[in-house]
Image (tube, rainbow, N blue to C red):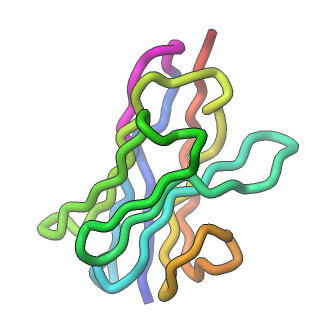
Amino acid sequence: QVQLVESGGGLVQAGGSLRLSCAASGRTFSSYVMGWFRQAPGKEREFVARLRSGGITYYADSVKGRFTISGDNAKNTVYLQMNSLKPEDTAVYYCAASSIRGTSSRQYDYWGQGTQVTVSS
């Protein structure tokens, strides 16, 4: 079992950048497929990006070219670098772990508490 704690959210102007962190404990994150999801008020939780063994990444079309997911094995931490942020990126961002590759939140077994990202126009 793995425990996940996100950090790094905040308020940023449109066009700015933020880096989210997801610190894993209990097991190494490399044992899982690691995903980032987000949920805006009144909307369903949506897939943002995932990272699996071998450094293989996959992104939602809405963030491709702007966001980068990466991992640091020594720190047992997964990151989401977010550049060129837009107001529509405003949401609570969640880190999650799964034993299988997927983009549905139902496929992820372990979740962090979330961190708020607000992008002002």
Which is more toward the observer, 56 or 98? 56
Instruction: Identify which residue is drawn at 29% across, 56% down.
Output: 70
| Residue projecting furthest to the right | 42
Instruction: Identify which residue is drawn at 39% across, 25% down.
Output: 17
Percent position of residue 82, x then y = 41, 35
Relative to 25, 59 lies left or right:
right
Q: Quadrant of residue 78?
A: bottom left
Number of residue marks? 0
Instruction: Identify which residue is drawn at 43% across, 70% down.
Output: 34
* Magenta span: 12-19
Which is more toward the observer, 99 or 4? 99
Instruction: Identify which residue is drawn at 23% across, 74% down.
Output: 54
Percent position of residue 53, x then y = 29, 77
Quadrant (top left, top right, bottom left, bottom right) of the C terminus: top right
Relative to 19, 28 lies left or right:
left
Percent position of residue 49, x then y = 49, 56
Which is more toward the observer, 41 or 106? 106
Is residue 56 highlighted in magenta?
A: no
Percent position of residue 57, x then y = 37, 61
- Eyeballing the image, is 62 above or below 88? below
Relative to 111, 80 lies left or right:
left
- Eyeballing the image, is 63 above or below 87? below
- Eyeballing the image, is 50 above or below 27? above
